[in-house]
């Protein structure tokens, strides 16, 4: 009986440490030292949450930089009659991420999607970019592995500078400076490639006004 009581005590103590004390310490550290990251890296504009620096958004206006296409349309709906209660629209409603998994040799890659799906086929994306005078890059044509990518390459951003500057009637140098300010470098200086956060860049553009 004595050994049984001792075992129960040890179990309760370990349970308290691992299930209560440790999680509370981690939450406290996260909220104090990494408050923004712990709460979703949210971005606010005049006190209103407009998005997250970790999740891309869809921009269609010529006065904004365009982001990377998404198979989930960044958890939004392209049309008012697009019913989010339907089972087939579950990925858009819940924000489920994932790529199309179509290989370059698959002909469906060129014609995937339509207006109602919230993303376009490769051929449509190419035509849209060419019409806008934007040099097509891989990240402006193909969706990412997560379909929630908030960044585009520096090359993709630079190819849109002239169009944005012309539409907004501002100096090209101003737009170039904003692109540079909103470019995230390699993680720890060695991992990955530099990328431009599209949401932050577009908010900075609106801030010029």
Image: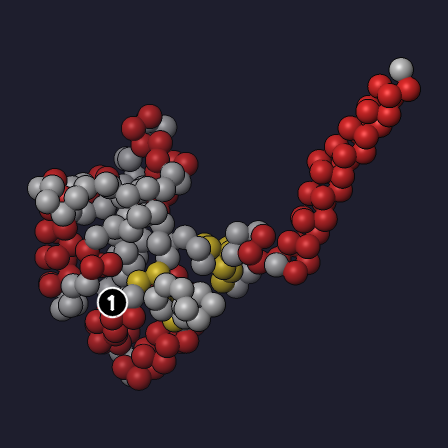
Write the residue at 70% across / 51% down.
Answer: 28
Q: Is residue 153 visible?
A: yes
Q: Residue at x 55, y 60 (%)?
A: 47
Is residue 57 among the parts visible in the rendering? no
Q: Secondary structure at mark 1?
A: helix
122 w.r.t. 81: above or below:
below
User: Eyeballing the image, is 128 above or below 118?
Assistant: below
Residue 181 image position (x, y, % from top left):
41, 76
- Viewer-closest of 113 and 207: 113
Residue drawn 33% across and 26% down? 87
Most distant residue in the top direction: 1
- Quadrant where the C terminus sits is bottom left
Toward the viewer: 19 or 8?
8
Residue 39 is left or right of residue 192, and the answer is right
Q: Is residue 15 left or right of residue 126?
A: right
Q: Is residue 63 above or below residue 95?
A: below
**Left or right of residue 22, residue 55 in this image:** left
The N terminus sits in image quarter: top right
Q: Position of residue 85 (x, y in %)?
A: 36, 28
Q: Quadrant of residue 76?
A: top left
- Residue annotated with mark 1: 156
Query: Which residue lies at the image location 28% right of the left edge and 43% below the top edge?
Result: 99
Horizontal and vertical percent position of residue 201: 38, 68
- What is the x, y in percent for residue 128? 14, 58
Classify residue 141 by image quadrant: bottom left
């Amino acid at each position: 009986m004595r050994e049984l009581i001792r075992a129960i005590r040890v179990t309760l103590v370990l349970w308290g440490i691992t299930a209560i004390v440790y999680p509370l310490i981690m939450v406290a550290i996260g909220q104090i030292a990494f408050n923004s990251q712990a709460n979703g890296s949210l971005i606010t504009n005049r006190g209103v949450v407009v998005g997250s620096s970790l999740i891309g958004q869809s921009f269609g206006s010529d006065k904004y930089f365009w982001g990377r296409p998404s198979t989930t349309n960044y958890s939004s709906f392209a049309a008012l009659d697009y019913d989010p209660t339907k089972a087939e629209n579950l990925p858009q409603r819940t924000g489920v991420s994932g790529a199309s998994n179509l290989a370059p040799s698959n002909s469906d890659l060129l014609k995937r999607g339509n207006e109602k799906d919230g993303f376009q086929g490769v051929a449509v994306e190419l035509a849209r970019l060419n019409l806008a005078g934007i040099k097509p890059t891989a990240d402006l044509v193909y969706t990412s592995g997560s379909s929630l990518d908030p960044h585009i390459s520096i090359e993709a951003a630079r190819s849109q500078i002239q169009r944005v500057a012309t539409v907004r009637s501002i100096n090209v140098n101003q737009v170039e400076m904003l692109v540079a300010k909103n470019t995230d470098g390699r993680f720890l200086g060695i991992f990955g490639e530099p990328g431009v956060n599209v949401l932050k860049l577009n908010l900075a553009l609106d801030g010029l006004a």
